[in-house]
Each structure stands twice: as structure tokens, then as C-alpha cells.
Image: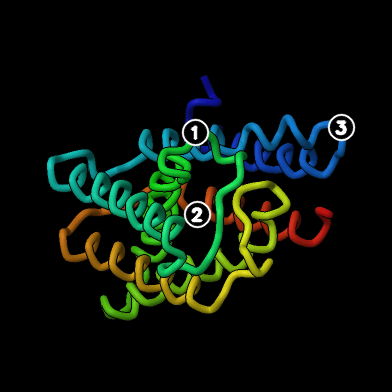
Amino acid sequence: YAFLTEPGIKRFLVIFYAVGITGLMVPSSFAFFVVLIPWTLLLNVILLSLFHKDGYDIRSIAVFLFICLSSFVIEVAGVKTGLVFGNYAYGNSLGIKLLNTPLIIGLNWLLLTYTTSSVLETLRMPLTVKIAASSFLMVIYDFVLEKVAPRLDMWSWINDSAPLRNYIMWFLMAAMYHALIKVSGVKTDNPLSAVILVSQFVFLTVLSIFLR
């Protein structure tokens, strides 16, 4: 039962992402590990939910659902019009789609908002600075992700690279969601947040350098 403890889960996550890096860098196992991408995101959310310390009330559930649903709707609008983030299209590695948009994408916005909020929650800084810093951290994450996403068939841009508009919208959406969390009083204290966020950063950075 040591695996089910906080230290056990943290060790599992580090090993899990290390195996993922290896699997995606080996040509013979690449396709198999790509299929696991949406399941990995879902696993992260499940593990985070188990270690969420503030409990779940109507307020927190409503905030989390709003982030999931509204981000999905915005992504759908982005895919359909090209006016939100720029002209892009989703590939097949993020799983089942609705309106040409993966269903998992709203959950991913929640995952990133939650973990970045959690990592910065304990720092002593003005609320506006904390919101801006958390949002900027998400933009940095997206910048690294954009180097890897086309190679993993997550999405691709019409002009082969993300436009400035994409990063501006990421910051604005992130700021909106972080402000909502702070204003609503929802706590995001979670011992797994830093491990997941750092593991994903390392995962994406290594793949952006070595994956061809």
C-alpha cells in the first residue's frame, strides 16, 4: 500500500513520465505511447482530485466545471473561426472529438490552471501579481508544448507555427480562470501539483529537443 501514499504517488509520476519520454523516443513504441496521451491527462486529473485538500462543495465544483466547459467552447470557436488563437486544427492523439475539438481539452485547461495556481498559492505576493505570474507560467508551458504538439499529432498550425495571438489568448484565458479561482475563494492546495507540472515541463522540454 506504499504506492497509495503521497510519496508513493510522487515516485510513480516521475517514473511514469520518464517511461513516457523513453517510449516516445523509441520509433517502435512511438505509436503506442501517443495513444496513451489523453489517458495520461485523465490519470493526472484523477490523482490530483484524490489529493485535493480543500474538499468539494458546490462553489468549487461550479468553478471547476466552468473552466472545463467554457475553455472547451472557446476552443471550438477557435477551431471553427480561426479568430481566437489563429488557424489550427486538432490531430487524432488527444482522443474523441466533438465539433472537431477533443473532449479532453477542457480538462487539460483545468489541469494547467489548477496546478499553476497550486504551485504559486503559498507564495507571499499581491493577488494581482499572483494571477499574472500563474498566467505567465501557463504561457511558458504552452510555448514549450507548441514545439512538441505537431510531432505528437495533437494539433497543427496552418502556417506551421503558433502566432502571437495564440499566446496572448492563452494569457488572457489563464488570467480569467486564475482570477475566478481567487475571487471565488476556491483553494488549490495539492501536494501533487508541483510534481505533475514539473514532470510535464521536463517531458515536453526533452521531447522538443530530441523528438524528430
Q: Determine whether label 2 and label 3 are within 8 Å by CB.
A: no
When the figure is inspected, residue 95 is found, relative to residue 153, above or below; the finding is above
Front disc: 1 or 3: 1
Q: Amino acid at mark 2?
A: Ala
2 vs 3, front mark: 3
Rounded to the nearest whole Å, what is the CA distance between mark 1 and mark 3? 24 Å
* Numbered tag placed on residue 96 in the rendering: 1
Outermost left residue: 58
- Report the side of 152 relative to 43 (left or right): right
Three-letter code, disc 3? Ser
Pointers 1 and 3 in contact (CB under 8 A)? Answer: no
Left or right for 165, reference 37: left
Q: Residue at 56% of width from left, 54% of height from top?
A: 89
Sequence order check, earlier mark of 1 and 2: 1
Could you tell me which residue is drawn at 47 percent across and 44 percent down? 100
At 50% from the left edge and 69% from the top edge, which residue is drawn? 86
What is the number of the mark on residue 173?
none
* Crowd tier of the residue under label 1, counting other residues whose Cα lies within 10 Å: few below 14, some 14–19, many 20 or above: few
Query: Residue pushed farthest front?
Result: 81
The residue lying at 49 percent from left, 71 percent from top is 166
CA distance for labels 1 and 2: 28 Å
Quadrant assignment, res 23: top right
Hey, which quadrant is residue 54 in on the image?
A: top left
Dot 2 or dot 3, earlier in sequence: 3
Mark 3 residue element: helix
Q: Which residue is denoted by mark 2 in the rendering?
A: 194
Residue 60 locus on image (x, y percent): 20, 47
Viewer-closest of 8 and 178: 178
Nearer to me, 75 or 188: 75
Specify which label sits upstream in the sequence, 1 or 3: 3
On screen, residue 169 versus residue 199, left or right, reads: left
Residue placed under numbered mark 3 in the picture: 28
